[in-house]
Image: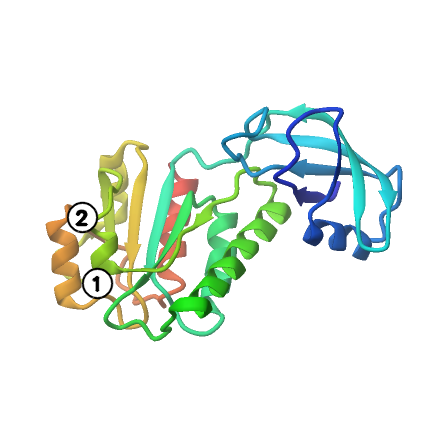
């Protein structure tokens, strides 16, 4: 059954218009009145009930709008057993788009793009705002595809220095190539399924100064093995281990 993100879906029995993107997708799929779809509201805090998904029936198709009647609610969730928040120096070009999509499929709880000393992608102002909206829409589409009912938040771009001053989970892991880094498996055992913040650098990694700052902020350096992975591959490999092997 086709799935669509609809933050206004909150109560069984209500009739509502689908958001523009969802309505356009329904039109593309050539669905018709009477067809069944699934709606999820992303787990927004003021939704009643909170999270889960709804059955819905298309009741009217306009030129660009689609009206549905919300059916029964299911509390079904498909979240990872371990809550992992990903913070990373943005990779260049379209690799960030791909990373947001795959991280969402793997169950990431949130994504924090960071500006670091070696960041290739430089964003600020209106351009940064547009990218944020774009990345959040990628996360929504990935949830529609993979079956998640809670959309991970893609936070606004900040510098690494400013981000490290914010409140972070107690379990903090830094992907590093330093020889003293411990295997990720050992660090996983120490976190005992508690929420984890995973920090990963851009192309070329974090600088020694940045790694030292992270270490002073209680980040534990961890390794994924002897191979050097790309900036978009390493955090996904670690995320898969943390969420799927918890």
Q: What percent of the width, then of the height, locates residue 58?
A: 83, 39
* Circle 1 residues within 10 Å: few <14, some 14–19, many ≥20: some
Gap between marks 2 and 1 measured at Cα: 12 Å
Q: Quadrant of residue 76?
A: top right
Say the numbered circle drawn on residue 220. 2
In the rendered image, the vertical position of residue 106 relative to residue 98, given as above or below = above
Q: What percent of the width, then of the height, locates residue 229?
A: 34, 66
Position of 176 with respect to 51 (left or right) is left
Position of 32 with respect to 54 (left or right) is right
Query: Tag 2's secondary structure?
Result: strand
In the rendered image, the vertical position of residue 168 relative to residue 26, given as above or below = above
Say the numbered circle drawn on residue 177. 1
In the rendered image, the vertical position of residue 92 relative to residue 15, given as above or below = below
Position of 95 with respect to 60 (left or right) is left
Q: Earlier in the sequence, mark 2 or mark 1?
A: 1
Q: Residue at x 52, y 49 (%)?
A: 105
Question: Quadrant of the image for the C terminus?
Answer: top left
Q: What percent of the width, then of the height, locates residue 67?
A: 80, 41
Say the numbered circle drawn on residue 105. none
Q: Residue at x 53, y 61 (%)?
A: 134
In the rendered image, the vertical position of residue 182 relative to residue 9, given as above or below = below
Position of 48 with respect to 54 (left or right) is left
């Amino acid at each position: 059954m086709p799935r669509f993100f609809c933050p206004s879906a909150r109560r069984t029995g209500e009739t509502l218009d689908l958001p523009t993107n969802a309505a356009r997708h329904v039109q593309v799929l050539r669905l018709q009145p009477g067809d069944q779809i699934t709606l999820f509201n992303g787990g927004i805090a003021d939704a009643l009930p909170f999270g889960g998904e709804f059955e819905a029936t298309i009741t009217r198709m306009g030129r660009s709008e689609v009206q549905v009647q919300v059916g029964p609610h299911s509390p079904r969730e498909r979240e990872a057993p371990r809550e992992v928040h990903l913070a990373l120096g943005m990779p260049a070009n379209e690799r960030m788009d791909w990373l947001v999509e795959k991280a969402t499929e793997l169950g990431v709880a949130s994504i924090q793009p960071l500006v670091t000393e070696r960041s290739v992608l430089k964003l600020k102002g209106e351009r940064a705002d547009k990218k944020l909206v774009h990345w959040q829409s990628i996360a929504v589409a990935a949830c529609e595809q993979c079956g998640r009912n809670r959309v991970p938040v893609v936070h606004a771009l900040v510098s690494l220095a400013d981000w490290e001053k914010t409140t972070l989970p107690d379990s903090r892991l830094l992907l590093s190539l330093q020889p003293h880094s411990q295997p990720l498996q050992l660090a996983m055992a120490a976190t005992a399924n508690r929420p984890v913040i995973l920090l990963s650098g851009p192309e070329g990694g974090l600088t020694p100064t940045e790694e030292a700052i992270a270490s002073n902020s209680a980040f534990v350096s961890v390794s994924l093995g002897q191979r050097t992975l790309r900036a978009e591959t390493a955090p996904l490999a670690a995320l898969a281990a943390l969420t799927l092997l918890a």
